[in-house]
Amino acid sequence: MKKILTMLAALGTAASFAFSVHADPQSDLKEFQGYFKKSNPGVKFDDFANGIYALPQYKEYRQQWMAIMEFPPLEIGLEKGKKLWETKFGNGESFAGCLKRGEIKPAYTYPRWDKATKSLHVAEMDIMDCAKKNNADPSIFTFIGADLAKDAKARVQLAELTGHYYSMFRGKRVKPDVDFKDPDALAAYERGKKFWWSRRGQLNFACSNCHLDLAGKDMANQPLSAGLGHPVGWPAQRLPWEQMETIMQRYVTCNTQVRAKGFKHYGDEYLSLQLYETYMSSGLPLTAPAMRN
């Protein structure tokens, strides 16, 4: 705690807010990615998709990661996810059918803006909708109707299923399917942007404090990744967790760590944040599902 408070004092009002307030996402994207490219000149653009392992100061972590990836622990969860993906629903349909019909979109296009409902969708939401529409058995697909904040087993099952789905698109370049000419879509982006840059909680920390100001540094013995590339490896299995989780759960734990008010899984706050984060990583290849520290 003393180390965290010392860092907070050093940050003061934070360099985070030195960025210009832009009206258009394209300008934000250019400035955001330009910052990380300039501050990490030795890192290739695509390597930012590997999180902390791309940063030269984390060479030791990278070596450990490369050794772990020879037999990655997440393979166990991926096998479970693949089996679930291939399990037929009671009506004979499957997730593959939903993907073929476009009810589940290509992973690299998420988050996407749904014009009919004027709302953001992420992959897990479309996967859950596919299961519900086809009357999937909730005793098998336990995430159906579950409180994902409380039911860890159901939440991990959804992460494993989504992880397998993402693995089919690994290497594809991120391009969220959002038309910012739609004022409602732009408003969702702006909410996510505000969330990322705004301080919250008793520790008075913003996402930008950790993933911009302190990117490449350690806080409480935890390495901090750059904001560029942060979302493209999720679902992921963090070494301390020993299980696969979605980025929603990562947002929950981040908020808890700064002692801030929590929000609902797949609620507007976290969906908007995922849109902003992912759009800022546009053009990077998907590495999900990934191993992370």
Image (tube, rainbow, N blue to C red):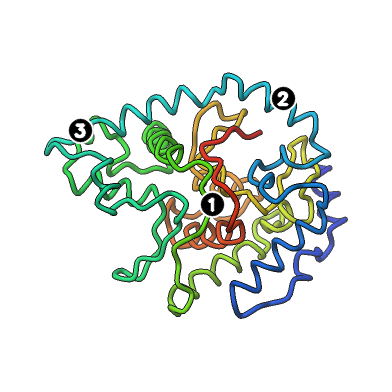
Q: Nearer the viewer, residue 90 or 5?
A: 90
Residue 118 picture quarter: bottom left
Q: Earlier in the sequence, mark 3 or mark 1?
A: 3
Dot 3, crowdedness within 10 Å: few (<14), some or many (≥20)? some
Residue occupying the far left of the picture: 91
| Left or right relative to 268: residue 96 | left
Q: Kindly identify which numbered label has been placed on residue 173.
A: 1
Give percent across and percent down for residue 253: 57, 44
Dot 2, crowdedness within 10 Å: few (<14), some or many (≥20)? few
Dot 1, crowdedness within 10 Å: few (<14), some or many (≥20)? some
The answer to whether residue 139 is above or below residue 196 is above
What amino acid is found at the position of numbered circle 3 in the picture? Lys
What amino acid is found at the position of numbered circle 1 in the picture? Arg
Number of labels in the image equals: 3
Q: Indicate which label's residue lies in the foreground, 3 or 1.
A: 1
The answer to whether residue 117 is above or below residue 77 is below
Q: Earlier in the sequence, mark 2 or mark 1?
A: 2
Dot 3: element: loop
| Left or right relative to 217: residue 196 | left
CA distance separating discs 3 and 1: 30 Å
Residue 12 picture quarter: bottom right
Dot 2: element: helix
Residue lying at 67% horizontally and 64% vertically, measured from the top left: 197
Q: Kindly identify which numbered label has been placed on residue 88.
A: 3
What amino acid is found at the position of numbered circle 2 in the picture? Gln
The answer to whether residue 164 is above or below residue 80 is below
| Left or right relative to 85: residue 176 | right
Q: Which residue is mark 2?
A: 64
